[in-house]
Image (cartoon, grey):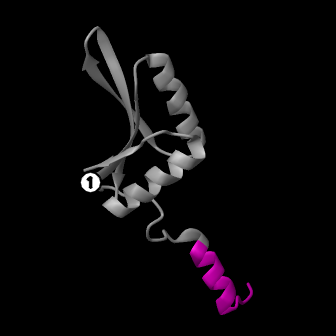
């Protein structure tokens, strides 16, 4: 056992506490970011894999369309509109997405 100074505790806290406006997900969060809607299952799975590899809990929702299905890829249960907007912008930049959409 040893002692830790207050500055070290502050640094550790910043690494482990959820920071406001960081795009975090929480149980019961009502906001979501639709990352993209794609036509083919192969394209949906490829984007799904990229988003998961980046560390995000993405889901795929099939949408009926003329001649088959389209696939919506989304991150759900975001804590607030601000959190969703922050995440949308972050994923737009880091994954090269064209137009993620924030909805409730």
Q: Nearer the viewer, residue 36 or 53?
A: 36
The vertical placement of 36 against 89, above or below, is above
Residues rendered magenta in the picture: 1-14
Quarter of the image containing the N terminus? bottom right
Which residue, given by chain and number where applicable, does mark 1 sit on?
A: 30
Residue 97, position as x, y percentages in the image = 51, 39
Q: How many marks?
A: 1
Asked whether residue 63 appears in the rendered view, the answer is yes
Q: Which residue is at 39% across, 61% downward?
A: 83
Asked whether residue 25 appears in the rendered view, the answer is no
The vertical placement of 38 against 7, above or below, is above
Whether the magenta-drawn stretch holds residue 13 is answered as yes
Residue 60, position as x, y percentages in the image = 39, 31
Q: Is residue 83 left or right of residue 43?
A: left
Point out the residue furthest to the front here: 98
Point out the residue furthest to the top here: 67
Q: Is residue 88 left or right of residue 52?
A: left
Magenta segment main secondary structure: helix
Residue 8, position as x, y percentages in the image = 69, 84
The vertical placement of 21 against 24, above or below, is below
Q: Nearer the viewer, residue 11 or 46?
A: 46
Number of other residues with Cα within 10 Å of mark 1, as a class: few under 14, some 14 to 19, many 20 or more: some
Q: Nearer the viewer, residue 90 or 10?
A: 90
For numbered disc 1, what is the local secondary structure? loop
Res 25 quadrant in image? bottom left
Whether the magenta-drawn stretch holds residue 89 is answered as no
The vertical placement of 26 against 37, above or below, is below
Q: Which residue is at 50% across, 17% downward?
A: 42
Q: Which residue is at 44% across, 40% downward?
A: 58
Res 52 quadrant in image? top right
């Amino acid at each position: 056992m040893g002692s830790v100074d207050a500055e070290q505790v502050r640094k550790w806290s910043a690494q482990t506490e959820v920071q406001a406006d960081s795009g975090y997900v929480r149980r019961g969060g009502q906001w979501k970011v639709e990352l993209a809607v794609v036509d083919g299952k192969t394209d949906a799975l490829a984007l799904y894999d990229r988003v998961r590899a980046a560390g995000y809990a993405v889901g795929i929702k099939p949408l009926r369309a003329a001649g088959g299905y389209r696939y919506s890829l989304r991150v759900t249960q975001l804590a607030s509109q601000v959190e969703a907007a922050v995440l949308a912008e972050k994923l737009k930049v880091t994954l090269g997405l064209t137009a993620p959409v924030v909805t409730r």
